[in-house]
Image (cartoon, rainbow, N blue to C red):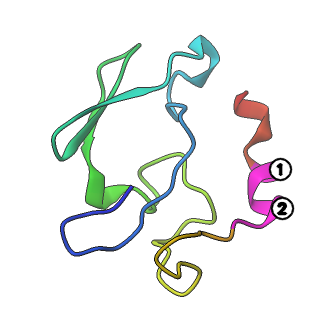
Amino acid sequence: MKDKQGNVHIAFDACDVCYEAKKGYKQDGDVMQCINCGKTFSITSIGTDNTAVVAGRVFTDEYDGNDVVIKITDLEAKSYMF
């Protein structure tokens, strides 16, 4: 998703704490909330060590306004969550 500054943030739809429940997140404005445990965090924290991140960073270089490039190895690294 994009934050208010236009930065793209990407994370898996799985809570780092309770991913085994396989319930994912819901969005409420600028906040994401785990459907299972209720953990909340700001959209701007997506892409930090606080979330189930893809590649652990905010995507700026890999985003051209339409597409985001995600490496297969980044997806494989968290595949155990699904």
Q: Residue furthest front?
A: 66
Q: Nearer the viewer, residue 17 or 59?
A: 59
**Residue 16 x %, y %:** 52, 35
Q: Main secondary structure of the magenta part?
A: helix
Element marked by disc 1: helix
Query: Please, what is the three-letter code of the amino acid marked with disc 1?
Result: Glu
Query: From the viewer's perspective, is residue 13 above or below residue 20?
Result: below
Q: Is residue 53 magenta?
A: no
The label number, if any, that marks residue 73 in the structure image: 2
Of 54 and 70, which appears nearest the observer? 70
Left or right: residue 5 compared with residue 64: left
Element on which disc 2 rests: helix
Where residue 26 appears, as percent x and y from the top left, is 34, 27
Give the side of residue 60 with respect to residue 71, left or right: left
Q: Quadrant of residue 71?
A: bottom right
Q: Residues within 10 Å of mark 2 (few under 14, many from 20)?
A: few
Residue at the spot 52% in from the left edge and 82% down from the top edge: 64
Residue at 18 percent of width and 47 percent of height: 30
**Left or right: where does residue 67 sit relative to residue 60?**
right
Q: Residue at x 83, y 60 (%)?
A: 72
Q: Which mark is residue 76?
A: 1
The answer for how far apart the CA atoms under marks 2 and 1 are is 5 Å
Residue 82's x, y, as percent?
Answer: 73, 27
Amino acid type for the residue under numbered disc 2: Thr
Hey, which quadrant is residue 55 in on the image? bottom right
Eyeballing the image, is 41 above or below 36? below
- Specify start and end residues of the magenta stretch as a single range: 70-77
Residue shown at 54%/46% (left/top)? 52
**Few, some or many residues within 10 Å of mark 1 (<14, 14–19, 20+):** few
Are circles 2 and 1 on residues that touch, CB within 8 Å?
yes
